[in-house]
Structure formats: structure tokens, C-alpha cells
Amino acid sequence: QVQLVESGGGLVQAGGSLRLSCVVSRSIFSFNLMGWYRQAPGKEREMVAGITRAGTTNYAESVKGRFTISRDNAKNTVYLQMNSLKPEDTAVYYCRAILPTVNWGQGTQVTVSS
């Protein structure tokens, strides 16, 4: 019913930038909360950034000042702009949408080389 498709991952050098996109199968304003999570091999999945229906945002301390979450309702898309990337940002990044069930995308791989 609800489909989320992430894209924009890839290989980037430390200090570089990437923009991830999450295209959703319905209006993003249908959801109480949308956000980005990431999971590195052998580690727990962690919250990176979130945005509420009202537009309130929150970020993990590790990415504050470097990552920005935004949305484009006309395109049913949520973005994650990632600047000043570090090797520790390497992970699979997942899009999540809650309405009221939790819906996950398949993820997009981000690899940051030293």
C-alpha cells in the first residue's frame, strides 16, 4: 500500500556531499512523521533525521550542522542533504514513514572513503 524508494547513495570521499531522496507512493502530508535512519554492518539501526507533518525537524547529535532533512510535497519526496561526510557516516540509509503503521524503504548504500 505504502511504497518508499530511496536513491542517491554512492561512494564519496571524506568531506564530500550527497543528497538522498525518498519517493513515497502518496502525499507526504499523509504521514505524522517521516525520517531517515541508518545502519552500519554489525551495528544497531539509528535515527539520523526526522520531520513532522508540521515541519518540525530533529537530528542525531552526530549529524547536526552537517545534514539537513527537507521535503517537496509536489514530488512526494523527502530529501536528506549530507555535507562534510565522514567515514563513520558509511551505512545503509533507510527512509521511514509513519501513518500510523511504520513503513520502511529498502535502503540506499552510502560509503565514505578516508
Image: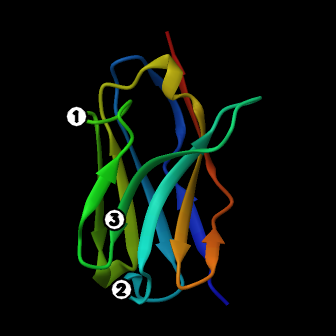
Q: Which mark is residue 29?
A: 2
- Structural distance between the alpha carbons of marks 3 and 2: 11 Å
Mark before the other along the chain sequence, 3 or 2: 2
**Residue found at x 34% / y 65%:** 51
**Residue found at x 51% / y 77%:** 24
Q: Nearer the viewer, residue 100 or 93?
A: 100
The crowd level at tag 3 (other Cα within 10 Å; few <14, some 14-19, many 20+) is: many
How far from the left and from the top, in percent, is residue 87?
A: 50, 18
Furthest-top residue in this view: 114
Q: Which quadrant holds residue 55?
A: bottom left
Residue 94 is left or right of residue 87, and the answer is right
Q: Is residue 73 above or below residue 20?
A: below
Q: Is residue 31 above or below residue 55?
A: below
Q: Is residue 47 above or below residue 10?
A: below
Q: Which residue is mark 3?
A: 51
Q: Judging from the image, what secondary structure is the residue with disc 3 in?
A: strand
Q: Which residue is mark 1?
A: 65
CB within 8 Å, label 1 to label 2: no
Amino acid on which disc 1 is placed:
Gly
Q: Which quadrant holds residue 91?
A: top right
How far from the left and from the top, in percent, is residue 65?
A: 22, 34
Residue 32 is left or right of residue 105, and the answer is left
Q: Judging from the image, what secondary structure is the residue with disc 1 in?
A: loop
Q: Is residue 65 above or below residue 13?
A: below
Amino acid on which disc 2 is placed:
Phe
Amino acid on which disc 3 is placed:
Ile
